Amino acid sequence: MTNGDLFSQVLQEYRPDPNILVKKRQELLRDLGDKLGAPVVAYIANTTHPISAMMQLDVDSVIDFVKVASRNSKELYFILESSGGDGNVAEKLLHVFREVFTKSFNVIVPNSAKSAATMLSIGADKIIMGTNSELGPIDPQIAVTLPTGQSQYVPAKSITGTLTKIKEDIEKNEKLATMYYPVLQQIRPETIKFCEDAISFSTSFAKRWLQKGSMRGKPKKDLEKTAKELTTGDRFNMHGSVINHEEAKKELGLNVEFWDQKDERWQLLWDYYLRAKASFQMNPNAAKLFETTETSVTMNIQIIPMQGVQPIK
């Protein structure tokens, strides 16, 4: 049976009773935990929901299932699906995981763990990935206001890099200063400082948690190289760049364990993942799912579309 067939079957099999779907997911977490010899918990974001980013509100839910998982184990496997969010939340969760699960803390990426989710992943002892799993760069994104009044996120390194290029161009040809003046007027000084601080935070984060986690014991020069590649490097120059299991292991030096699609552990994981995604399709207000073998919490956030303003006649 293909993955697509399984997903369709799940959608049909468990309508209209989502409680059966919850029990089946918890059974799969239990079966996977039995094979791994440690508890498995899940944090699955509905990446199609507009408010699915990693945020401070998540911490309480995560702490609750940490309590459940740590009753009889100092080891944890954490299934993670997220497009990213607040890097400070990633760091806070890492402090909790590393303090509670002293034997080992491992992240499993069924599909996508990007940006802040990558930050959380590199702090793990081991990152488990499959053929379609991906991490991403952790270069900070800054909200800037466009001439239209709308906001858009751009990489902090793009802003600082633009300033560096302008400086170099003017040093070579002073006449270009007049041409660049309108551009420089649009960049506020505090924005530049904010970009520099954000890049500094991401780089410092990477070095600190790589050393404690997925690159523990590696030479300092290797840590610094990987931190640079993830934050300001040119190899993965777009924020959405895909870092697959081979690149994560060979190019970045992360401690990655690969599960192929024939691996029974991967099959259990993928079965669980599709059922989690099916629950989002059944409930479009669901932004995130937090789950253990005993508890299941769905964060529901309803998006109310704004009504257009009617012109005065």
Image (cartoon, rainbow, N blue to C red):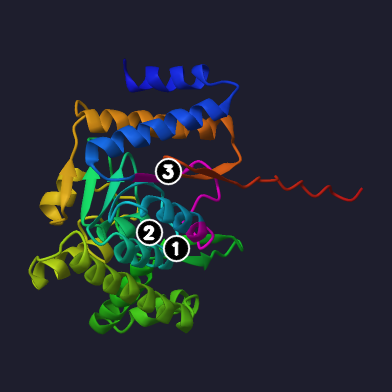
Q: Where is residue 213 in the image (x, y as percent from the top left)?
A: 21, 62
Residue that extends furthest to the left in the rendered view of this protein: 219
Can I make out residue 269 in this image? no
Start-end of magenta stretch: 40-60
Residue 50 belongs to magenta span: yes
Which of the numbered marks, if any, corresponds to residue 113?
none
Q: Which of marks 1 and 2 is nearer the N terminus?
A: 1
Which of the numbered marks, if any, corresponds to residue 292?
3
Can I make out residue 213 in this image? yes
Mark 2 — residue?
Answer: 116
Q: Which of marks 3 and 1 is nearer the N terminus?
A: 1
CA gap, disc 3 and disc 1: 23 Å
Q: What residue type is labelled 3?
A: Thr
Residue density around tag 3, few if under 14, some if 14–19, many if 20 or more, within 10 Å: many
Mark 1 — residue?
Answer: 86
What secondary structure is found at the residue carrying circle 2?
A: helix
Image quadrant holding the N terminus, namely: top left
In the image, taking residue 74 as reference, residue 13 lies left or right, namely right
- Name the residue at 14% across, 50% down: 249
Q: Position of residue 40 (x, y in %)?
A: 33, 44
Between 295 and 274, the one nearer to me in the picture? 295
Q: What residue type is labelled 1?
A: Asp
- Name the residue at 44% across, 28% down: 24
- Name the residue at 37% across, 64% down: 96
CA gap, disc 1 and disc 2: 6 Å
- Mark 3 vs mark 2: in front: 3
- Name the residue at 57% across, 65% down: 147
Circles 1 and 2 in contact, beta carbons < 8 Å: yes
Q: Position of residue 268 (x, y in %)?
A: 30, 30
Circles 3 and 1 in contact, beta carbons < 8 Å: no
Above or below 175: residue 16: above
Between 104 and 155, the one nearer to me in the picture? 104
